[in-house]
Amino acid sequence: MAKIEKNTEKIILGLDPGTSVMGYGLISVKGQQMSLIQFGVIHLSKYSSHEIKLKKIFERIISLIDDYHPDEVALEAPFYGKNVQSMLKLGRAQGVAMAAALSREIPITEYAPKKVKQSVTGNGNASKEQVAQMIMTLLHFKESPKLLDATDALGVAVTHHFQGGNTSTSTKSWKAFISDNPNRVK
């Protein structure tokens, strides 16, 4: 019987869904050692229709999955704001990102923004800049990213690692998603 190596690499794709700018970040985890693979943003404000933005999100997430082969996807859950239309659009963006991961049978887990901030900085009310600084320290890179959506996405990936890659709240397939969310699927 083959011996399973404890330092097997796991790749986590973190996503910070948005309808103008969507952040993404990929980290590699070997044992407890994290390293940065890639991060960036998907610019969506140049597209006039919401439907085209959703299509671009799906295509770009599929491209990232096909290029980097993440083992798990972690998403920042939308926070509840006062503008219902913005919330609906953000929820759709998150749903499309989830659909992209599910289409490749990759487990997904959601984290609340406060949970990410608490996990990364120790303060659930930390600013985006504080999250960025801690991510730069944790992942050992010096150049400050221009857009904080990318470091937010890395924060989601790091949180997933810190949570032990707990996929108890994750969805592994469309069937599991429907089973876990009967009120969201009609």
Image (cartoon, rainbow, N blue to C red):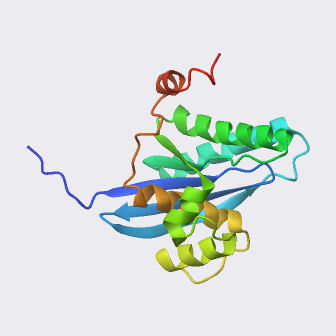
Residue depicted at 62% across the width and 56% down the height: 113
Q: Residue furthest right?
A: 48
Q: Quadrant of residue 172?
A: top left
Residue depicted at 48% across the width and 75% down the height: 138
**Quadrant holding the C terminus:** top right
**Rendered view: 84 above or below 174:** below
Q: Is residue 159 left or right of residue 98?
A: left
Q: Position of residue 119 (x, y in %)?
A: 49, 64
Q: Residue furthest bottom?
A: 142
**Quadrant holding the N terminus:** top left
Q: Position of residue 3 (x, y in %)?
A: 12, 51
Q: Position of residue 5 (x, y in %)?
A: 20, 56
The count of marks equals: 0
**Rendered view: 139 above or below 4:** below
Q: Residue furthest left?
A: 1
Residue depicted at 52% across the width and 27% down the height: 177
Q: Is residue 20 left or right of residue 155?
A: right
Residue depicted at 68% across the width and 69% down the height: 128
Q: Quadrant of residue 153?
A: bottom right
Q: Residue furthest top?
A: 186
Q: Position of residue 90 (x, y in %)?
A: 75, 43
Q: Is residue 52 left or right of residue 15?
A: right
| 152 or 125, nearer to the observer | 125
| 148 or 60, nearer to the observer | 148
Residue 140 visible at all:
no
**Rendered view: 5 above or below 58:** below
Residue 54 visible at all:
yes
